[in-house]
Image (cartoon, helix red, strand yellow):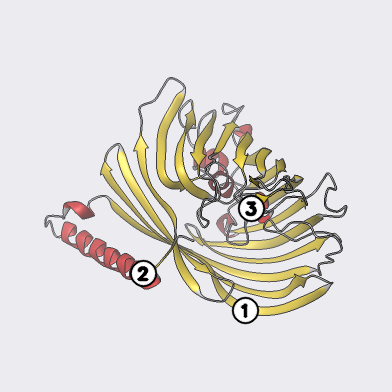
Amino acid sequence: MRKLNSRLIIVAFMLVALLSRQARGNEEANLNLHKSLENLKFGILAYLDYSAGQSPIAGGDEDNYNRFALTRGYLTLEKEIRPWLSARLTADVHLEDNGDYNVRLKYYYANILFPDLGPLTNLKSEIGMGHMPWLDFEEHINPYRCQGVMAVERAGIFNSSDLGVGLMGYLGGKLPDAKKLTGNDHYDGRFGSWHIGVYNGPGYHAVEENQNKVVEGRITIRPLPMIKQLAGLQLSYLGIYGEGNTEYIDANGDNVFPEYALHLGMLSYENPWVIFTGQYFTTLGNASGSLVDAEFDALETMGYSFFGNVRLPVFDKRISLFGRYDYFDADIGDDVAEDTAYETIVGGIAITIYKGNLLLLSYETTDYEEDSGGTKGEPPVEGNNLGNDNKFQVVLQVKF
């Protein structure tokens, strides 16, 4: 676990914020700005959560809860060092299972910009603990990460960042008037975007247990940018290949790591009024290596998810209705058990307050089949008989 001393990090961020404020005041007073504070940005993203419901327990029981929580607190520093070189550090205030809040690194990388190479434009590389190709992309289409993680992360296949090297860019420059046409100016390549990378594999909050590196790549095509009504249509593919991060001893006494591979396709459509996504994915195992059979071979899994969001024509489109459906089967080959799937339904309302600050109310329910191990990469267990998972949730997302 890459945890840091919480007090030291928080004090450091507060000091930088105060220095930045003082520096801005000095700049307004026409005083010299210290070079270390030039082009320095500081930001916060927090999810202040109230949830009430039931958590599933093996054997068909349920555990009731009713709690306030800070489910996420991101503190970010970004610094431009040269026009082609910058750095980012994001600390993640995280709630542990024992109730403690700890701070760990989420992102810590150097960002290098490159000249365009023909149709490959807006080229950059993240070196260090950077974004992996998928989740940051999907979370800029589905704006409600504060409600819960995306389908593939909920299934425990992989998370959002890792140590390694990533190269990314656009196809054909930027889409003109992207915000006006699609309601979104992130990943606004005219003909799409792409991201490839090589990473340790286990993600940002686990230690690498093997010497294998995981190769990941995303390609997104925007087929009709010249048609106003279809500029927000995109087709995306994600591929991953490597090994899971758990070491096992097989029947011959050999140390083995399970295979890990993924294929994911998604269709998405965005305009200022409507968002829709539909995705389908299959895997062999997962990044952590937890999805294996009795002989430690990776399980074949399958999942799909649909998400929709509609902005209502009132209060300057600040009110939205959204819904989501996830299905995931952790053992489609029935190597461990037969009934190993779960399905999740989410519905709610979101009220935009100001520039990424919003209030969200939602209801979520998950139905587990008889042998499902649960979400977050839990392996199937024959006769597990999890109880129902139901949650009413209110989230205030604070961002600046």
Q: Which mark is residue 297?
A: none
Q: Which numbered disc, 1 or 2, marks the residue that appears first in the sequence?
A: 2
Q: Which numbered disc, 3 or 1, marks the residue that appears first in the sequence?
A: 1
Residue 15: x and y in percent read 27, 67
Give the structural element (helix, strand or loop) at label 2.
helix
- How far apart are the two marked residues, 3 and 2, measured between alpha carbons? 28 Å
- How far apart are the two marked residues, 1 and 2, measured between alpha carbons? 24 Å
At label 3, the amino acid type is Glu
Comparing labels 3 and 1, the label whose residue is closer to the camera: 3
Comparing labels 1 and 2, the label whose residue is closer to the camera: 2
Rendered position, 10 above or below 111: below
Q: Nearer the viewer, residue 272 or 58?
A: 58
The residue positioned 38% from the left and 59% from the top of the image is 43
Residue 64: x and y in percent read 73, 79
- 63 vs 136, left or right, is right
Give the structural element (helix, strand or loop) at label 3.
helix
- How far apart are the two marked residues, 3 and 1, measured between alpha carbons? 23 Å
Q: Nearer the viewer, residue 21 or 55?
A: 55
The residue positioned 60% from the left and 28% from the top of the image is 227
Q: Which mark is residue 153?
A: 3
Q: Which residue is mark 1?
A: 67
Q: Which residue is mark 2?
A: 10
Q: Residues within 10 Å of mark 3 (few under 14, many from 20)?
A: some
| Residue 222, quarter of picture | top right
Residue 146: x and y in percent read 58, 61
The residue positioned 87% from the left and 63% from the top of the image is 383
Residue 262: x and y in percent read 67, 39
Rendered position, 144 above or below 223: below
